Amino acid sequence: MMESEFPQELQTQAYGILSSNDVEPLETLFSHVFGSQEPQRSQAYTFLHCCKKHFPHLLFIKLFFVIRCSPVSDTRSRSALVLRYLKICDLWPNLSLIAQNYMKSHFLVCLREEVSMPTLRLLCGIVSEMGSEISKAGHEWPELMDFLLNSIQSDYEKLQQCALWVLAYLPKGFRPVVCEALVPSLEPLHSAILQALSSPNADIQVTACGAVVSLIGLFTSSKGRNWFNDLLRAMMVGLFNLLSHLKEEYARGAVNELIMLVMDEPQILKPYLNHLVLDMLNVLECKKVTDETKLFVDKFLLAMAEATDLAPMMRELPHETMFRLLTTSMQLLLSIKDDNAWYNTESEQGEHDGKMDVYKSGILFLRKLSTALGEKRILPICFELFLGHMEATEWKKRHAGISLLAVIAEECSDEMVMRKDCLDQVTAIILKSFKDPHPRVCWAAFNFMQQPTNLVQAMQILYHLKIVCALDAALDQHRNPTVKVLHRDWLCMIHEFRVVYAS
């Protein structure tokens, strides 16, 4: 018999706590698990894993006992969190059939009676996972389906929310089973979810979006009526309503559910792709919408561009739509501040000082989008945007223009080199930017010329003398220490390049 990794003394202590009716030791354990003080926290986790290994059935029953009987909502919530952390799939199979049947009935009672919404939300996730484990074992849970149908059609908002949470949290492998079980109730279920999507309660509205994603197989497999069409339209209307009422946190939740839909079932969105893109562009162009929410929308658009089933359609978007998409993305690159720390050569952040998270996300988004859409599709539009931004009076736009150029040069260098007019224009603008009145634009131009791309290499070969002369002129003009450091480093690199090329 293999020796346990946990001492016998700890096993004895664990059995004593789990088999008693006293919940105080578990309450103390929770305070350590959710605390930050060491070594108590590590010891508490070791205790839990000892319980899971040696007494999984007692652990499940004890945690449920706390959930069912504790008068303190925080304690019930913590017990549910621990139960989810320990993974239902590892604990449930260790329960006897009698214990499983008991849990099935009493967990549904818990869902009806729990008054704390945060705790209820956790319990709904547990019930979804329990249903999955029951199904894996070849058993059914018809009482759960009855509970979901009755609750989602209830006039009591708490029960509606509860049913929607259970549906939204369904594990992927369990979703087809639930969809099949709900086929006879398709019409009333559709009506209930459609109503929930327009609920004045934002929590219900967003959770209904998650339920649609979970039950997408139900709403799209039925012949005849297109049940999904109404639901998707309601989801988009709900999203705009949330934004108009300044409930952006909820709006981000709704967009996140749409992202999950793209990742799980992209082919379903083919008939709606053009409308979805236009709707999302309207969100991106709205000045009242925060950058944080716009980043979620960008993730949705990127997910569609990267999805194998949708990518060809994204590449065939009309020129005007593609121009709007890339223009709105450029707005993210304006999220840069003229941070004083940037001018300090000793700064730990260095070149990143003043660059906000939105700027960095914008660069990443443009890089991935250019890869997904392909150079021939994005180069003409991006180059047009680059030229327009470099003529702007605002330094942030000129900086954004060079940032965009750096991104597309990674993906489209060969195409840009083959187009001599493009190569000539880029060279002229970059050399002009060496003497830009704003140091950050100069720095961006110098930094661009250090990129290991075919475009930069071609510029250095074909316009070497012009580049060296422009560098010398810029050195006399700039007194900014950060720019001077980069300028000096690049002069050394140019010299090395000249030696290598000459040889």
Image (cartoon, helix red, strand yellow):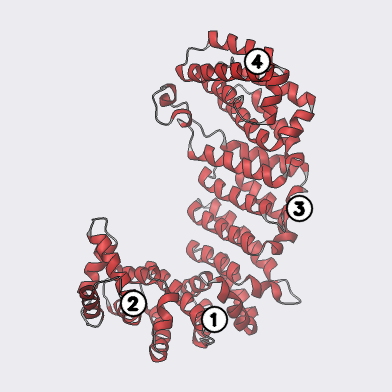
| Near-viewer residue (249 or 16) | 16
What kind of residue is marked 4? Ile
What kind of residue is marked 1? Leu
First in sequence: mark 3 or mark 1? 1
Mark-to-mark CA distance, 2 and 1: 48 Å
Residue 2 marker: 2
Instruction: Say which residue label 3 marks.
Output: 312
| Labels 2, 3: front one | 2
For the point 66% across and 62% down, which residue is it? 233
| Near-viewer residue (28 or 10) | 10
Q: Secondary structure at mark 1?
A: helix
| Percent x, y of residue 250 | 50, 57
Q: Quadrant of the N terminus?
A: bottom left
Q: Secondary structure at mark 2?
A: loop
| Near-viewer residue (132 or 1) | 1
Q: Is residue 55 above or below residue 268?
A: below
Q: Is residue 365 above or below residue 140?
A: above
Instruction: Say which residue label 4 marks.
Output: 467
Q: Quadrant of the C terminus?
A: top right
Mark-to-mark CA distance, 3 and 1: 39 Å
| Percent x, y of residue 281 | 65, 46
Instruction: Say which residue label 1 marks.
Output: 149
| Number of other residues with Cα within 10 Å of mark 1, as a class: few under 14, some 14 to 19, many 20 or more | some
Q: Secondary structure at mark 3?
A: helix
